[in-house]
Amino acid sequence: MTIPGKQVTALIGPSGCGKSTFLRSLNRMNEMIPDCRVEGVVKLDDEPIYGPGVDAVAVRRRIGMVFQKSNPFPKSIYDNVAYGLRLVGMDDRSELGGRVERALKHAACGKK
């Protein structure tokens, strides 16, 4: 299946037909599930995303997912909001704290 760039591609089907499982395979989330196996080849820009030495985090930076329901990590609200920034290497506590607070304010969740 080739997915064209800069266009909307929709996966439709009844509940339980595998849409979410397929999307999780593109984001390499299925491998976090015990006893899950991967067969075949998934490529991004002609490079296999499950190849030897391919960093799953690097793949996830290029293939994002938006969940229908919020799906926070089992961490604090602060850590969930800061997760993406930490993932790209931000570790300055004061800058990180300021960005998290601004994000929460913009979401109407923080102190005003």
Image (cartoon, rainbow, N blue to C red):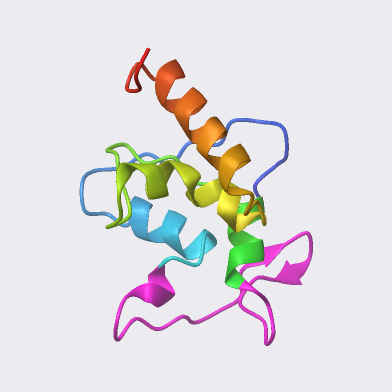
- Residue 55 found in image quarter: bottom right
Establish if 23 lies above or below 99: below
Residue at left offset 39%, top offset 70%: 30
Residue at left offset 37%, top offset 12%: 112
Residue placed farthest to the left in the image?
15
Residue 8 appears anywhere in the view: yes
> 19 left or right of 91?
left
Rendered location of residue 85, percent (x, y):
59, 47
Residue placed farthest to the front in the image?
94
Observer-nearest residue: 101 or 24?
A: 101
Residue at left offset 29%, top offset 39%: 70
> 84 left or right of 35?
right
Observer-nearest residue: 83 or 49?
A: 83
- Residue 81 found in image quarter: top left
Rendered location of residue 100, percent (x, y):
48, 34
Residue 50 covered by magenta stretch: yes
If the image is split into quadrants, where does the N terminus sit? bottom right
Q: What stretch is highlighted in magenta?
A: 30-55
Residue 65 covered by magenta stretch: no
> 4 left or right of 14?
right
Rendered location of residue 7, percent (x, y):
66, 31
Establish if 26 lies above or below 107: below
Question: Across the whole image, how many numbered discs are drawn on residues?
Answer: 0
Q: Main secondary structure of the magenta part?
A: loop
Residue 1 appears anywhere in the view: no
Residue at left offset 55%, top offset 48%: 84
Residue placed farthest to the top in the image?
112
Rendered location of residue 103, percent (x, y):
48, 27
